[in-house]
């Protein structure tokens, strides 16, 4: 672990905001903000520093090419979505995907949920305008996630409310409690591989393919049991949490000094990342995350250069610690083969220790004729394939995928084995922000990525 003296103390909130913090809510009542932050500072940690260190070690294996990262979950969590069914369904699809990747590609899979903190979203505009029947055009503040304001298009709902940050904490705690119960209490036992393949997935082609894998795993487990081998890893999984570290008040209030090491950790999640819109080298988000000990990520979009990435690595991981830094690339299916090679080649040549991960979702969003934001499944696959091909050509390791998905039967992304059409989007479009792969599409993605991994 790095010596804290190489990073310095965590700046106070006022100093961070003075750097120019992008994508922050404009709160109307500063006293209410102070009260919410003080309340958050009094709460226990959501995760522990030792768990963050364990994840750093796992991500070091990813950076070496000895493991693969599966990171997935909602685009934006909602308070109403904190139910046992929703949490179980998200966990179930991640477990299924991990089993497919591990078994089919024979590589350890690091499992990282995009949950228990993913309540805030950056926006391209501070305002949203809609045509309301009988009223005309109305302009209100944009919805920035349940951490900031409400999705309902009313003036009262769209006012940023710092008390929502307190609710983020409680909702995240509830999610983590249930995830830990599922992953250690028998639900994640490998003997449950068939039970995970229920409802609408079972009747699909990809569900049948999954059943074949599950049957092979069953036979392997029976053999292991017959010879007296029953490792603890068969009965539980390690699932870590992650989210974009966006709202400074929340992340700063949950940054604590670890009693073991006297070093700062952001205990709001095991892994936090900086988005494409907040990765300014001299900005507040880079400054804050440069001080904490958690493993961290940075989204790199099509405007990112290799020099940008190398400079970010120098700020965020000055000791070049393996597992500390993950670059999550989001170039778009049509650009990944042109933009990614010079980026990866120069960063690798500079000796930067980093895990390379593909986000095939955010560069492939478009608006359907019906007005729904959507993504083509074929574009998602094309970007992942491009990501793998680039790394294969360079002799580097394609370390993982970062996917927006849900465990439900939604209709938000078109294509895939189900052949969802744009005309189907209205059937079950439930995301409050960006479109997500449904469970069948997510499982299909896992099989396709497993094939890519075999070749890698």
Image (spheres, helix red, strand yellow):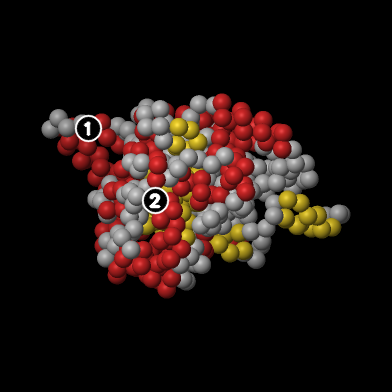
In primary-sequence order, the first of circles 1 and 2 is 1
The label shown at residue 231 is 1
Residue found at x 54% / y 42%: 11
Quadrant, the C terminus: bottom left
Q: In this view, does 28 lie to the left or right of 304?
A: right
**392 over 224 or under it: above or below:** below
**232 over 58 or under it: above or below:** above
Element class at badge 2: loop
Q: Distance between the residues labelled 1 and 2?
A: 35 Å
Quadrant, the N terminus: top left
Q: Which of marks 1 and 2 is in front?
A: 2
Residue 204 visible, this angle: no
The label shown at residue 317 is 2
Residue 405's spot in the image, x, y percent?
49, 49
Residue 448's spot in the image, x, y percent?
36, 58
**Residue placed most toward the observer, 347 or 161:** 347
Label 1 crowd bin: few (<14), some (14–19), many (20+), radius 10 Å: few
The label shown at residue 151 is none
């Amino acid at each position: 672990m790095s010596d804290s003296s190489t990073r310095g103390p965590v700046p106070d909130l006022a100093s961070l905001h003075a750097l120019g913090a992008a994508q922050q809510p404009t709160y109307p009542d500063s006293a209410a903000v102070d009260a919410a932050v003080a309340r958050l500072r009094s709460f226990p940690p959501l995760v522990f520093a030792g768990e963050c260190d364990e994840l750093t070690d796992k991500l070091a294996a990813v950076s070496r090419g000895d493991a693969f990262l599966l990171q997935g979950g909602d685009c934006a969590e909602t308070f109403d979505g904190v139910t046992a069914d929703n949490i179980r369904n998200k966990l179930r699809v991640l477990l299924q995907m991990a089993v497919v990747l591990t078994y089919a590609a024979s590589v350890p899979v690091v499992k990282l949920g995009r949950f228990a903190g993913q309540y805030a979203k950056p926006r391209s505009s501070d305002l949203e305008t809609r045509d309301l029947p009988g009223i005309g055009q109305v302009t209100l503040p944009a919805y920035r996630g349940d951490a900031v304001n409400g999705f309902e298009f009313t003036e009262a709902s769209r006012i940023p409310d710092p008390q929502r940050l307190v609710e983020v904490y409680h909702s995240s705690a509830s999610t983590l409690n249930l995830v830990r119960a599922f992953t250690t209490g028998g639900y994640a036992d490998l003997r449950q591989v068939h039970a995970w393949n229920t409802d609408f997935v079972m009747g699909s082609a990809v569900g049948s393919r999954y059943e074949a894998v599950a049957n092979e795993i069953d036979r392997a487990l029976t053999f292991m049991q017959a010879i007296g081998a029953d490792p603890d890893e068969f009965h539980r999984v390690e699932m870590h949490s992650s989210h974009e570290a966006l709202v400074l008040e929340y992340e700063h209030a949950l940054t604590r000094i670890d009693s073991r090491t006297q070093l700062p950790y952001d205990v709001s999640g095991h892994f936090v990342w900086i988005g494409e819109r907040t990765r300014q080298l001299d900005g507040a988000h880079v400054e804050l995350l440069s001080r904490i000990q958690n493993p961290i990520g940075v989204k790199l979009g099509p405007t990112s250069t290799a020099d940008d990435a190398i400079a970010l690595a120098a700020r965020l991981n000055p000791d070049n610690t393996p597992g500390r830094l993950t670059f999550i690339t989001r170039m778009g299916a049509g650009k990944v083969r042109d933009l990614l090679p010079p980026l990866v080649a120069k960063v690798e040549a500079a000796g930067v220790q980093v895990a390379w991960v593909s986000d095939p979702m955010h560069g492939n969003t478009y608006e359907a004729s019906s007005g729904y934001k959507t993504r083509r499944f074929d574009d998602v696959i094309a970007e992942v394939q491009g990501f793998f091909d680039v790394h294969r050509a360079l002799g580097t390791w394609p370390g993982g995928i970062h996917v927006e998905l849900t465990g439900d039967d939604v209709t938000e992304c078109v294509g895939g084995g189900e052949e969802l059409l744009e005309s189907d989007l209205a059937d079950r479009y439930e995301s409050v922000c960006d479109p997500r792969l449904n469970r069948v599409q997510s499982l299909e993605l896992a099989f396709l990525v497993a094939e890519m991994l075999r070749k890698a």
